[in-house]
């Protein structure tokens, strides 16, 4: 329970670091900067960190999309909104409503075919944002629920050490 309370305090502190309040009127700090086409980074990890922080601040989760490889290695990588695409969930057909195996069940379908994405390509020895679309077709998480997004559910080493002591 102590770990959870510490984690909640950490999430609140992270939200304050990004300059966010319940009314969402403040501008984000440099740490939660919006990605822009043409921005260059030395490693793909730096780009991921920027986009993940931005997504957590805005209220959506990210997942890795497609990748393109060549003989030289990874050349292109795409990150998409977690609600991109259409669910592959299959609802079983209802044959006999009295049979347990034939009943319909409710399947969680979070996909809304959202088109938000960020695409990276390598130019020389740097990664560059080549495409950035921030148009979502779904509601973003409210400030009070952002801490529960998968992207924000990280327990840092600092919190882990505090819990261990």
Image (cartoon, grey):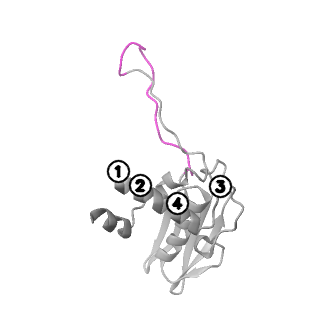
Q: Position of residue 145 (x, y in %)?
A: 55, 50
Q: Is residue 95 magenta?
A: yes
Residue range of the region highlighted in magenta in the rendering: 83-101
Q: Is residue 134 left or right of residue 76?
A: right
Judging by the rendered image, the residue that carries numbered circle 1 is 1
Q: Secondary structure at mark 3?
A: loop
Along the line of sight, the residue nearer the viewer: 78 or 41: 41
Tag 2 and tag 1, C-beta contact below 8 Å: yes
Q: Earlier in the sequence, mark 4 or mark 1?
A: 1
Q: How far is disc 4 from disc 2 in space, using C-alphas?
A: 11 Å
Label 1 CA crowd tier, 10 Å (few <14, some 14–19, many 20+): few
Q: Residue at x 41, y 54 (%)?
A: 5
Q: Earlier in the sequence, mark 4 or mark 2?
A: 2
Q: Where does label 3 land, which residue?
A: 22
The disc label shown at residue 12, or none: 4
User: Of the residues under marks 3 and 2, which one precedes in the sequence?
Assistant: 2
The dot on residue 5 is 2
Between the C-alphas of marks 4 and 1, the distance is: 17 Å
Q: Are marks 4 and 2 in contact (CB under 8 Å)?
A: no
Please identify the quarter of the rendering in which residue 159 is found: bottom left
Q: Secondary structure at mark 4?
A: helix
Looking at the image, is 62 positioned above or below residue 139? below
Magenta stretch: includes residue 89: yes
- The reply to whether the C-beta atoms of the residues labelled 4 and 3 are less than 8 Å apart is no
């Amino acid at each position: 329970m102590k770990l959870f309370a510490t984690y909640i305090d950490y999430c609140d502190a992270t939200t304050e670091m990004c300059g966010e309040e319940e009314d969402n009127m403040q501008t984000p700090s440099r740490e939660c900067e919006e990605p822009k086409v043409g921005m260059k980074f030395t490693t793909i990890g730096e780009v991921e960190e920027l986009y993940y922080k931005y997504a957590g601040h805005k209220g959506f989760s990210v997942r890795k999309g497609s990748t393109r490889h060549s003989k030289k290695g990874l050349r292109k990588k795409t990150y998409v909104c977690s609600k991109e695409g259409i669910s592959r969930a299959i609802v079983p057909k209802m044959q006999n409503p009295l049979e347990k195996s034939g009943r319909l069940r409710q399947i969680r379908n979070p996909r809304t075919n959202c088109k938000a994405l960020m695409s990276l390509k390598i130019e020389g020895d740097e990664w560059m944002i080549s495409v950035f679309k921030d148009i979502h077709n779904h509601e973003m998480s409210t400030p009070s629920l952002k801490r529960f997004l998968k992207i924000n559910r990280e327990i840092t080493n600092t919190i882990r050490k505090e819990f261990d002591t």
